Amino acid sequence: MDEIFKALADPTRRALLDDLYREDGQTLGALESRFDISRFGVMKHLKQLEDAGLIVTRRDGREKFHFLNAVPIQLVHDRWVSKYAENWAAGLSGLKKELENTMEKIFEVYIKTTPERLWEAIVDSDIRSKYSFGNRVETDWSAGSHYEMTNVRADAPLGEGEILEIDPPRRLVQSMVALWGDDVKSEGTSRVTWEIEQVEDSCRLTVTHDQLREGANEQLYGGWPMILSGLKTWLETGTLLTTPGSLMYT
């Protein structure tokens, strides 16, 4: 939390986040052109934001793209905002709305656990239901297998797809078709990639939701910060995290 607040304390770094909030996935050159400081200065600010987990980067050839990571902001909300004023959550949720026009969403979180335990929490339906809005994933977890996302309080499957790649306990790739409402059924198939990397006594979990239609319905990806916050809370404390998503089927 200290690193997050330190990063947010500087107005230039907040402006960089605002710029990625408006247009995700930008290069250093694109960001540099919008600020009246040196290229080195922009690089220094981006490095501090990356160290705090507020942005993540991906390389494509010689280009390096910067993406806003909403998970730490969700954690700040869970830790500092929700317990004081629940009605603020609606205002903070506006952070997601400007992210609709890109094809790829990246979410990253550090969890103090082992790769094996984290992997189990992803593929075990009983555990998954504890942090994923009560939803279960039914499949045999083999490459090429079909899966369904279900909820005991829903009359029909909420989603389905195929296991595209599976490499325990490091990488899982799934296609995804949302079925929970007519407004998302028309969105077609997207892809979700889970990547686990051990970092000393913790794991870095990166979830990439891509192959999204430009302007795709926010419901497809807007729940990831809540899901990953709930996953971190469950693995580190053994308790359930109450979020707006977790109350959907209560």
Image (cartoon, grey):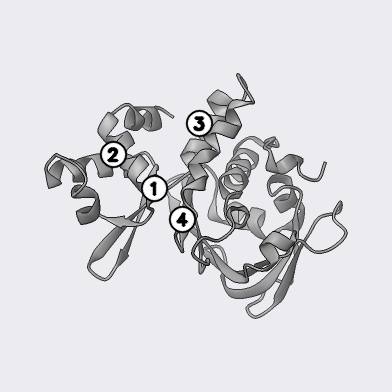
Any part of residue 124 in sight? yes
The disc, 1 or 4, on the residue closer to the chain's N-terminal end is 1
Which circle marks residue 48 in the picture?
2
In the image, 69: left or right of 115?
left
Q: Secondary structure at mark 1?
A: helix
On screen, residue 5 above or below 73: above
Give percent across and percent down for residue 61. Answer: 26, 71
Circle 2/circle 1 CB separation < 8 Å: no
Q: Secondary structure at mark 4?
A: strand
Q: Residues within 10 Å of mark 1 (few under 14, many from 20)?
A: some
On screen, residue 78 above or below 107: above
What distance separates the C-alpha of mark 4 from that of mark 3?
A: 18 Å
User: Residue under circle 4?
Assistant: 106
What distance separates the C-alpha of mark 3 from that of mark 1?
A: 21 Å
The disc, 4 or 3, on the residue closer to the chain's N-terminal end is 3
Q: Secondary structure at mark 2?
A: helix
User: Residue under circle 3?
Assistant: 76
Kind of residue sitting beneath label 1: Arg
Q: Residues within 10 Å of mark 3 (few under 14, many from 20)?
A: some
The disc, 2 or 1, on the residue closer to the chain's N-terminal end is 1
What distance separates the C-alpha of mark 2 from that of mark 4?
A: 18 Å
User: Residue under circle 1?
Assistant: 22
What distance separates the C-alpha of mark 2 from that of mark 3?
A: 17 Å
The quadrant of the image that shows the N terminus is top left
Give percent across and percent down for residue 241. Answer: 67, 36
Closer to us: 209 or 121: 209
Circle 3/circle 1 CB separation < 8 Å: no
